[in-house]
Image: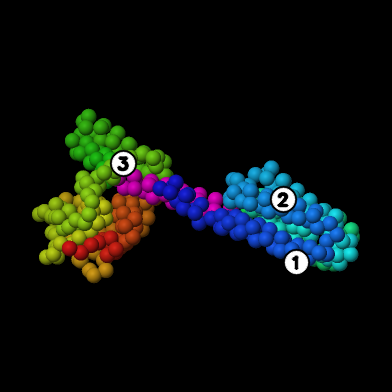
Amino acid sequence: MAKERRERVVMMSVEQPLWRALTGYRVLTTVYASLLFGFSWQRFPHPWIAVAYLALLAAWTLATLPRVANAASCTKRFLGADLTVAISGILLTPAADSAFRVMHGATTLPSIWTAGSVLAFALKGGWRWAAFASSLVAAADIIERGRPTRDTLHNVLLVWIASIAIGYIVEVARASERTLARALEIEAATRERERLARGIHDSVLQVLAMVQRRGAELGGESAELGRMAGEQEIALRTMVSSGLVPTGSTGPSDGATAGNEPHRAGPCDLRTLLARYAGSRVSFAEPGTPVLLDAAAASELTAAVGAALDNVRRHAGDDAQAWILVEDEPDEVVVTVRDDGPGIPEGRLAVAEGEGRLGVAQSIRGRLRDLGGSAELISVPGQGTEVELKVPRGKAGHA
């Protein structure tokens, strides 16, 4: 999952469109420089120098299009050669054009194509590389003019500021993408850890708690076994709550839920999954028509109901009465689990979560959150507890 999200971040990169824009810019400015010469070639004392250079420039631009397709292809050696082509064109301009035209601000042979070479430095290495390349171009422009003029300084400053700004934006974009990729990895790892924590809570921790309780009741050697089981339960809860469970492991939820219900393809009737919880102490109320949910969503919702009933037996006692109510609403499926136990004291859930007891936090609320739903717990001391589980209709289907 993390790998897929990293690939998605690369696809969302703002850097790649800039490389594509640079490719188009180089082609268009090559055509532009050729047209400028074509309209004024009669004014050149030595037009063959300009023709030779522009022919070289066109061949170089077309041959190096793959080099400016992305950052990996744009190597330092290529950047150095590309900048050399640009600066050579600037310095060759006085040899091809007249001194009068050069002194009065005639464009150089490569014209604005030179800015593309500087922008390649900016996209590849950021604002520092851009400052280096634009400074060399500025020096070449001043040498070509013979002396710094207002127009020359204006053009040099424009290229210098624009290239540095783009280089800085690229650096910020890369840093943001790395941060986003890391956040997505952490999110994926956290969700996997929560899934494993739910599986551990629904299986291993409950078995250890039962062994501890039964061992204490039987006494003797069984009491020692129960004590050891209790110690292991505490240690395992600490590992789960502190995030030490390896995210690459497989848990009970791989292939089956806590209720040993396999994940099947297609929709299934939620009523058939919840019916097994009905008994002398659990009343089950259901609609008269099938309540269809995606198989994975139905499995997770059933496991959350099972976790709620486990809490009833553990905290309200074996004699507590519980009720399960299923409501098939137009936009969501609602399952309510209610009991007549003593209720949950205020602040008890926060204390339990801090102790690593994740029955409500992960086995119930965590499951519903992953389904895009919600779990609301209402408890009044002395009046029982009610857990309302909601799954949006987007996870359900109609017969």
Please say if the residues under marks 3 and 1 sit with CB atoms less than 8 Å apart: no
**Is residue 192 on the magenta stretch?**
yes
Which label sits in the foreground, 3 or 1? 1
Q: Give the secondary structure at mark 2.
A: helix
Instruction: Report the Cα–Cα distance between label 2 and label 1.
Output: 19 Å
The amino acid beneath tag 3 is: Gly
Q: In the image, is 183 to the left or to the right of 73?
A: left
Residue 339, picture quadrant:
bottom left
Determine which residue is flagged by label 2. 56
Residue stretch rendered in magenta on the structure: 172-201
Q: In the image, is 225 to the left or to the right of 131?
A: left
Q: Residue 366: x, y in percent?
A: 34, 54
- Circle 3 Cα neighbour tier, 10 Å, few/some/many (<14 / 14–19 / ≥20): some
Determine which residue is flagged by label 3. 251
Q: Residue 347: x, y in percent?
A: 36, 58
Q: Give the secondary structure at mark 1.
A: helix
The amino acid beneath tag 2 is: Leu
Q: Earlier in the sequence, mark 2 or mark 3?
A: 2
> Residue placed at 86% from the left, 65% from the top?
101
The majority secondary structure of the magenta stretch comes to: helix
The amino acid beneath tag 1 is: Phe
71 or 62: nearer the viewer: 62
> Residue placed at 32% from the left, 36% from the top?
232
> Residue placed at 13% from the left, 64% from the top?
289
